[in-house]
């Protein structure tokens, strides 16, 4: 009797121990916020409606394109990626609210693909104190890169890189007098500061800023800005705004007889701008920080086009390829972090990606550098509305 009693107690203890071990394993697997045994929850705030909607929609489309392909193949280390997106209308207050919701309520593992400088700056005020990874904002502003924050990673070149390339090309073509029209927000400030910085470089010798004017974000009321800059007879006008504002500015200046050159940085929304301008877009130049999406010259672009075509989409664009590139780099970081995924391991994994080749586009992260690329090239809208190099 005593022996049987001891055996029963031992068996009960073994069952209890198994239960404790199982619960501990489950607890370990779910220890990091936004990570379960089979999912990784990622959050995005972007303009999905309103005047800048195409920027957010394209960035989101490209990211989901790759995340869905990864999920269909079994996910990352056995986990599928869930991308939760909230609409911020390209307004900073909404972006801050969305970020708080994604962190506190949705419990995301990381924030991904925010669109715009003012919105990203507002989001970082929430994300940085919480230590949440903030990956691949669709912005080149220095204010997002300096001072260095360990949880923030950039895949694209900066606006300083873009404006330096723009000013250099202006000088190369023999133009000397430039004007700048810019948003009266953090994005516009980053752009005008980039131009001013570029004008101090040896590559800009002989080029001078003769006029500047600001415009309200998301506006098409640009008459005052046009009057201000055209009065100084600039050879070229650099515009730091989104596609609807830029289209109104170009058309308005042309109606007043302006025949000079227009330049834009990549955030303008290339495809949306070409569509908005129509025949008026011929000759408008845009700096780009992503691979040219319209030809299959690299493995990355071929893969991007193949996945889009599989969804019945043959309309390629710079916004969605940026989302696609960002998603590929993000997933590589998850893979390197391993099955025991934490935010700290993810950050360390990204920092190990020195000179990582994303199929023809290189990204270079390190513990002291979270700006992955300095690639910039120029494109131009032709008379047929096509974007060519």
Image (tube, grey):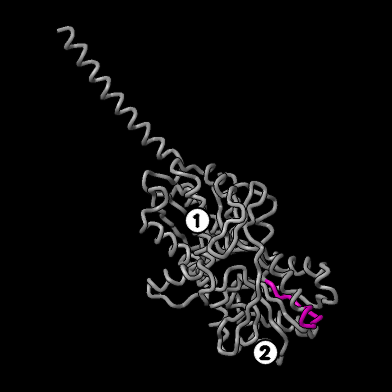
Quarter placement of the N terminus: top left
Q: Earlier in the sequence, mark 2 or mark 1?
A: 1
Residue found 51% across the figure and 70% down from its top: 301
How many numbered discs sit on the rendered protein? 2
Quarter placement of the C terminus: bottom right
> How far across and how far down the image is residue 361, in percent?
58, 64
Residue 248 left/right relative to 201? left
Secondary structure of residue under mark 2? helix
The residue lying toward the viewer, choosing from 96 and 293, is 293
User: Is residue 186 visible from the viewing direction of this image?
Assistant: no
Q: Give me the disc on residue 61.
A: none
Residue 377 left/right relative to 294? right
Residue found 41% across the figure and 58% down from its top: 70
**As drawn, which residue projects farthest toward the top?**
2
The quarter of the displayed image where residue 6 is located: top left
The residue lying toward the viewer, choosing from 381 and 339, is 339
* Residue annotated with mark 1: 98
Secondary structure of residue under mark 1? helix
> How far across and how far down the image is residue 19, in percent?
30, 28
Q: Is residue 69 magenta?
A: no
Residue found 38% across the figure and 71% down from its top: 310
Using the image, determine if residue 17 lies above or below residue 364: above
**As drawn, which residue projects farthest toward the left?**
1
* Residue annotated with mark 2: 254
Q: Which residues are magenta?
A: 171-182
Using the image, determine if residue 116 lies above or below residue 336: below
């Amino acid at each position: 009797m005593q022996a049987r009693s001891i055996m029963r107690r031992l068996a009960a203890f073994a069952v209890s121990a198994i239960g404790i071990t199982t619960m501990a394993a489950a607890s370990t697997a779910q220890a990091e916020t936004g990570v379960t045994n089979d999912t990784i929850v990622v959050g995005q705030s972007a303009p999905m409606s309103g005047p800048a909607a195409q920027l957010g929609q394209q960035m989101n489309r490209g990211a989901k394109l790759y995340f869905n392909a990864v999920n269909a193949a079994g996910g990352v280390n056995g986990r599928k990626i869930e991308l939760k997106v909230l609409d911020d209308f390209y307004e900073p207050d909404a972006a801050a609210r969305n970020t708080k919701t994604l962190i506190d309520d949705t419990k995301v593992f990381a924030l991904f693909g925010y669109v715009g400088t003012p919105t990203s700056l507002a989001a970082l005020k929430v994300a940085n104190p919480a230590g949440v990874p903030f990956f691949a904002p669709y912005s080149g502003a220095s204010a997002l890169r300096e001072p260095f924050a360990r949880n923030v990673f950039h895949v694209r070149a900066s606006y300083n890189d873009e404006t330096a390339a723009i000013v250099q090309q202006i000088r190369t073509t023999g133009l000397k007098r430039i004007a700048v029209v810019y948003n009266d927000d953090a994005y516009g400030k980053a752009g005008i500061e980039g131009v001013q910085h570029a004008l101090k470089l040896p590559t800009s010798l002989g080029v001078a800023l003769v006029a500047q004017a600001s415009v309200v974000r998301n506006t098409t009321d640009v008459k005052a800005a046009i009057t201000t800059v055209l009065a100084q007879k600039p050879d070229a006008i650099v515009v730091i705004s989104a596609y609807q504002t830029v289209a109104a500015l170009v058309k308005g200046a042309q109606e007043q007889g302006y025949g000079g050159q227009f330049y834009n940085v990549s955030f303008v929304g290339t495809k949306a701008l070409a569509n908005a301008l129509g025949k008026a877009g011929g000759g408008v130049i845009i700096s780009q920080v992503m691979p040219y999406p319209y030809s299959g010259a690299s493995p990355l672009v071929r893969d991007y086009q193949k996945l889009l075509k599989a969804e019945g989409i043959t309309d390629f664009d710079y916004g969605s390829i940026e989302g696609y590139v960002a998603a590929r780099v993000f997933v590589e970081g998850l893979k390197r972090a391993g099955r025991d995924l934490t935010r700290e391991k993810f950050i360390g994994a990204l920092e190990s990606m020195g000179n990582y080749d994303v199929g023809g586009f290189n990204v270079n992260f390190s513990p002291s550098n979270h700006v992955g690329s300095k690639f910039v090239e120029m494109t131009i809208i032709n008379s047929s509305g096509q974007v060519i190099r």
